[in-house]
Image (spheres, rainbow, N blue to C red):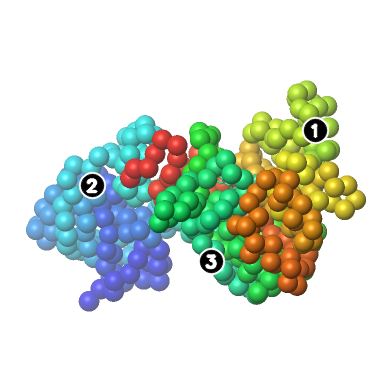
Amino acid sequence: MAVVTTIERISKYVDQDVTINGWLFNKRSSGKIQFLQIRDGSGFIQGVVVKSDVSPEVFEKCKTITQESSIMVTGSVRADERAPSGFELTVKDVEIVAIAQEYPISLKEHGTDFLMDHRHLWIRTPKQHAILRIRDEINRAIRDFFHERDFVLVEPPIITPASCEGTTELFEIDYFGQNAYLSQTGQLYAEAAAMAFGKVYSFGPTFRAEKSKTRKHLNEFWMVEPEMAYVDFEGNLKIQEEMIAYIVKRVLENRKMELKTLERNTESLENVKAPFPRITYTDAVKLLQENGFEFEWGDDFGAPHETFIAEQYDKPVFITHFPTKMKAFYMQPDPDNPEVILGADLIAPEGYGEIIGGSQRIHDLELLLHKLEEEKLPKEIYEWYIDLRRYGSVPHSGYGLGLERTVAWLCGIDHIRQTIPFARTLNRVYP
Ligand code: 4AD
Ligand code: MG
């Protein structure tokens, strides 16, 4: 009896018989030999069916297998340096589970709209598969990073009574006759959790109703949000650069095949080690002005500005001390210059833009009340959040990393819609 295994684990079974449960990705034939490209979710491998080595039934059966038919293939594992996976399967038997109808995604080029309409099938193909495998690796690296450092995972609610980040981009829902919103960020709840557990992180879907059509915006995306009691601006940046370096290292170590499939140039990634360079917002404005950009202190960076700033460095760069007026109400103003905040955005290299936004939070009760009033936010709804400043308030900090932008950067792909299994964008809620 052959052992049932996966393509990913096949190196353990050289010269032994194994069964792979998978699908036919592609097929070639030269009369006496059929080459079956088999995928099983864990990888891709070539199965070779030699007419003289198998029964006539098996050989004939292989001819009937169409693209994406589900098959259970038994054969012996052969190490082969020329094969992309390093191995080949000498097929002995095939069991057909289901013959697939004519597959909509042929191996020729298709337009992106067509592929996004068939996203449920597109994710089977090598590049999309590689992107989502890398996404999984990043997911795991993030969780490992925080748990190794004694952070506690705390899940904030997705349905919230108030805005956390700003009012313009909320998806409103009817919550039994009361207005509620899909969460833009779990941060405020993470702050409550940090006062209960010290160091926490949340990791979940967040929703932005912005009508952006850029390659960096989704209306539903995943964000990891650490929040730490007794950590200030400086400590906040330190953990961010450590985390990014950790994630990059893990992907480089564990997802070599996938990076190769994506033809990702990994040289720039090898360089991503802490510490990261920093520039203040004010200095970044000067830099832009000196280089011919029309830009005033107080303007928000657009993609060309971010890209230009990032190009000055060979690692991700922190832009720190943004104008207080530009940023969310909860950010701690710099005591030495309250016009700017003790926060930073982390800009990824190669034009991937802002991947992290974070800051020290206001911990002073009076200052927070003043800010809520200034921003005309309804105090009643934030009572619980204000309570955190009434009962044992401490300086604390946190940040949010956008998962999809991180995946796009590490995979080197140009559009964020390919970094999430089923993207939600301005023009798309299907499939
Ligand atoms: O800068 P943002 O809006 O920060 C917050 O929401 C804070 N409350 C986070 C915190 O401090 N706990 O978003 C954080 C990150 C961005 O840097 C970006 O990577 C990602 O979330 N992001 C988006 N990703 C995809 N599509 C969008 N529309 C995004 N908006 C933000
Ligand atoms: Mg931001």
x, y percentage for residue 242?
70, 61
- Residue 139 image offset from top left, x and y in percent: 53, 60
Are the two marked residues, 1 and 2, in contact with CB atoms closer than 8 angstroms? no
Seen from the viewer's position, the closer of residues 32 and 241 is 241
SS category of the residue bearing label 3? loop
- Above or below — where is 184 with respect to 147? above
Residue under label 2, please give it. 67
Q: Which of 273 and 406 is in front in this view?
A: 406
Of 110 and 2, the residue lying toward us: 110
Residue underneath mark 1: 297
Q: Is residue 238 left or right of residue 72?
A: right
Which residue is drawn at the image coordinates 77% and 52% (left, top)? 370
Residue at x-position 70% and y-position 35%: 300
**Identity of the residue drawn at 38% across and 60% down:** 42
Q: Going by the image, does 336 lie left or right of 422?
A: right
Check disc 3 and give the amino acid type. Answer: Glu
If you read the primary sequence from the N terminus, does the residue marked by circle 1 or circle 2 appear first?
A: 2
Helix or strand or loop: what does disc 1 sit on? loop
- On the question of residue 235 being in view, the answer is no
User: What residue is shown with label 3?
Assistant: 155
Marks 1 and 3 close (CB-CB < 8 Å):
no
Residue 85 locus on image (x, y percent): 41, 56
Disc 2 versus disc 3: nearer the observer: 3
Q: Mark 1 vs ligand 2: CB under 8 Å?
A: no
Amino acid bearing label 2: Gln
Pick the residue in front: 82 or 225.
225
| Disc 2 residue: CB within 8 Å of ligand 1 | no
Residue 213 relative to residue 31: left or right? right
Residue ID at (79%, 37%): 284
